[in-house]
Image: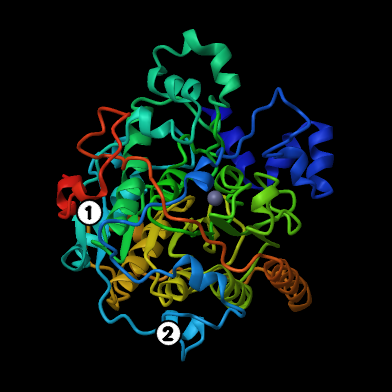
Amino acid sequence: MLHIRRRTLEYSDRRIHSLPPLAQAAVAVGSSKAAKSPTDPTDPTDPPSSIPFDLDQRDLKAPAFAPYPRVQHSEVANLETPGDNPLTPNLTSAEANMVPNPKSRVSYFYDTDVGNYHYGPGHPMKPHRMRMTHNLILNYGLDKKLDVLKPRRATAKEMARIHTDEYVDFLWRVTPDTMDKFVAHQSKFNVGEDCPVFEGLSEFCSISAGGSIGAAQKLNCGDSDIAINWSGGLHHAKKREASGFCYVNDIALAIMELLKYHQRVLYIDIDVHHGDGVEELFYTTDRVMTVSFHKYGDYFPGTGELGDIGQGKGKHYAVNVPLRQGIDDETYASIFEPTIQAVMDWYRPTAIVLQCGADSLSGDRLGCFNLSHKGHANCVKFVKKFNVPLVIVGGGGYTIRNVCRAWTYETGLLVGEQLDPELPYNDYFDYFGPDYRLEVPSSNMENGNTPAYLEKIRLQVLQNLSNTKFAPSVQMQDVPPDFFSRDDEDEDDIINPDSRPRDCRELWE
Ligand SMILES: [Zn+2]
């Protein structure tokens, strides 16, 4: 048990000290490429970790029914400035996107089993926090404002859309009882300590991934404006290995689902740790822009420096905002808002996935930022205002009472409900003492992010964005079949879009 505790602590800023000297040097000089190298064309023995983007060639099929206005190829190509939105010619794009949407239709995915899984004694990742969050959401009565759905569980075949068959096969076969047979595999797939093999591991991954895929499908159907899966957000999982408590990258699976019907998908990550797994998978495409705000410098996973901006066709479509410890609400907003505003103006995503890792909150067991619940939720609020179809997922968060507070507060915000700061009685009321309130206050910790430092970052990010070919677009052609389709048993079946279920209820239990 102590072994696990020691290793998992390395997920915080102590992690770097356990690296071999060469790796330490690479991280210390900020050369995240040394640690990552998503595609190294000089090494044919190391297949790329990015998803091979045949979707770039295959492109998109217009859905049989378009749930919302879409910017078409020719219109985008003719634009000269970020402000010329063909849908609302008299408004800047920001103003057009911020036309008030009085009532968002919000769906919410939750599986009652998710809280039953345990990473092991002493491990900071506690799936129980999802059950606590759900219970608090129910006791605030927010379920009355939500379309509450139980996700279907993702299958191994679905996971293999982004992960290697060999890795998925391992995840589905290994159990605590059969670990002895997989000794070599444990090292190969980075499973064992930070990412332990626990009872029901593959089911847990299926629930997390199924919720995020379902959330994406809810948007694709035009059935919801916003879809929430607090059990998702496991952003460190790699194509062929586990990392940082994450095994299956539910976010990348959701993005792949969105890409069937969306030209450009924006991924935003406010977890205290760099969203390395998602960035790496989409590092070489302009179909997905990844934007991560994270602690950088002597901190897990060691990647996400300012100069990491994507490669090949994806150059300039990865944005990294490296931050120092102790960032507070005001300072965070001062870098988050202009960055996201510029990304929206330049990139014009037609769907957004927002990872709301709650380890960026003040007082997190592994985190080192100083955000209150309001500072954290301000990111959700800011992104929501653009009225672009939005998937919300969870992520890190290790002071679990605060994770529940923040995610409940943000669920309220997403449905337009002001919540009473006095917590309602709930099944886990004792966790919230001694104040029994909803707030997560900031502390007096020192802010390592000076205005001059943030201004330098802001200018560099805007400079990088201005190098993007404005709002890339794709032609409309065939798409792969939907996950969870009724014909999903036959992988060669290409769905006729006209036969897609109009009633999305068919897709969920
Ligand atoms: Zn994290």
Q: What element carries label 2?
A: loop
Residue 97 occupies which quadrant of the picture?
Answer: bottom left
- Left of 381 or right of it: where is 223? left
- Residue occupying image coordinates x 41% and y 11%: 178
| Amino acid residing under circle 2 | Thr
What number is the disc on residue 272? none
222 over 372 or under it: above or below: above
493 relative position to 377: left or right: left
Q: Which mark is first along the chain, 2 or 1?
A: 2
Residues under numbered marks 1 and 2 in contact, where contact means CB atoms less than 8 Å apart: no
Residue 441 drawn at (x, y percent): 49, 71
Q: Position of residue 170 (x, y in %)?
A: 45, 20
| Other residues around mark 2 within 10 Å, as few (<14) / some (14–19) / many (≥20) | few
Q: Tell me the residue that label 1 is attached to.
A: 427
Q: Position of residue 445 (x, y in %)?
A: 65, 68
The tally of labels here is 2
- Mark carried by residue 88: 2
